[in-house]
Amino acid sequence: MDIELSHEQRMLLETVQGFLEQEIYPHEEEVDRLGRVPLELGRQIEKRAIDIGLFAANLPESVGGGGLDYQSLVLIEREFGKTSHALHSWIARPAEILMACEGDQVEKYLIPCAKAEKRELFALTEPEAGSDIMSMKTNARRDGEDWILNGSKHFISGPVMPDFAIVFAVTGMDETERGRRKRITAFLVDVGTDGFDISEGTRSVSYRGYLTFQLGFSDVRLGPGQILGEEGRGLELSGKWLSMNRVWVGASCCGKAERLFNLASEWAATRKQFGQPIGKFQATGFKLADMAVELKAADLLVMDAVSKGDRGKMSDSDAAMVKLFCSEMLNRTADNTVQIYGGMGLMEEMPIQRLWRDSRLERIWDGTSEIQRHIISRAILRPLGA
């Protein structure tokens, strides 16, 4: 990525790159083979990230975070994208929705997450409510001042068993211009609460070692102090930060694409067939050219959204464009890299097959490509009355 960096940003980038070289890259193959990050290794990464100030870099300094702006955070997320998600997720960026914590919630949830004393899960997806959030069945009903929570969540991901979950549940129905609509509320639910069952879920071939969890709620009693934000404003609250997270996904896709592009370029320049480097054949060289153009375009999309984000002017459509283009660009880059390597690209001894597998997930989580297209098309048509 060719952008002009300030002295402070250059130092930050060099710090991140050095940390990844020492603490992350050496363990990628082992974690992919084991399908798990050894707890001792994860805690080591966590501690060393705290020591150099990378932990919770996305949260304000007032709550113990790094206080970085978006222009600086994008540098971190892009470099993280080059590495194993299972490993770099130990350098936590706590869910920014926790900034909605009030009163006792600040000391119980927000600050402990910023200090690595607690870990959270963002629990939104359900077996029948992935992209279709309004099909959510998890619900909470009033019982005096308390709430009784029932339902389930799956594909809830994190590096380690959490201390609590941010759980979204239906708490009623509202009448809107578009008809009746479910009222969704966010709750803070501690692991160990009676009726709250949590276990590791199925394993993914993408980002091996990054865990998924299944959550079940059976008559879980929650006090009024367990609501995050306001009752019925859960989706609105999450949306405030969800769009920016899609930009971070886009940035990480650019990082991974750059790593793949460099591997493909080196192979094309050194691998010989018919007496010359394969990169001299148009079938290969043109692939490299397309990869370079798409990566440049993706980086520019990311930087445009980040600039708007820092000025408070980024729209959901801006974020959706980033997520859509960058994730699909990465998949094309990964597939072309495998093709350039040929059979060697699928051998376990090479990192290509792992990066190829990891790339596929980016078009699904944080909103599928289809959902991003829906957001973009809606932004185009609604102002026209459609």
Image (spheres, rainbow, N blue to C red):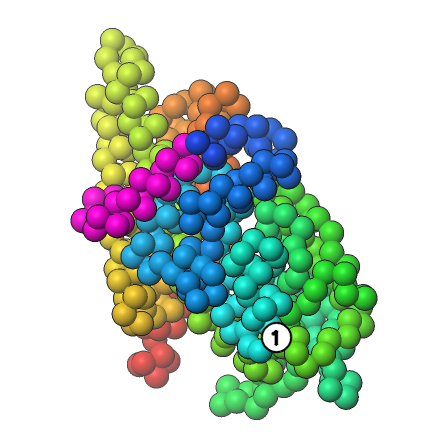
Instruction: Write down the quadrant of residue 279 in the picture.
Output: top left
Taking 374 as reference, is 324 above or below it? above
- The kind of secondary structure element at disc 1 is helix
Q: Residue at x 31, y 72 (%)?
A: 312
Is residue 385 in the magenta section? Answer: no
Residue 150 in the image, given as x and y percentages of width and height: 75, 71
Q: How many numbered badges does the structure rendering display?
A: 1
The answer, for residue 370, to whether it is visible in the render is: no
Q: Eyeballing the image, is 233 above or below 268?
A: below
110 to the left or right of 71: right
Residue 83 showing in the rendered view: yes
Q: The C terminus appears in which quarter of the rendering?
A: bottom left
Q: Please tell me whether residue 177 is drawn above or below residue 276 in the rendered image.
A: below
Q: Which residue is found at the position 74% from the left and 82% from the top?
A: 146
Tell which of 38 and 325 is nearer to you.
38
Q: Amino acid at mark 1?
A: Asp
The residue at 32%/46% (across/down) is 12
Query: Disc 1 marks which residue?
Result: 104
Given residues 155 and 341, the one toward you in this image is 155
Q: Which residues are magenta?
A: 1-21
Residue 159 x, y percent position in the rendering: 59, 47
The overriding secondary structure of the stretch rendered in magenta is helix
Which quadrant of the figure contains the N terminus? top left
Looking at this view, is 47 or 372 the one in front? Answer: 47
Q: Residues within 10 Å of mark 1 (few under 14, many from 20)?
A: few
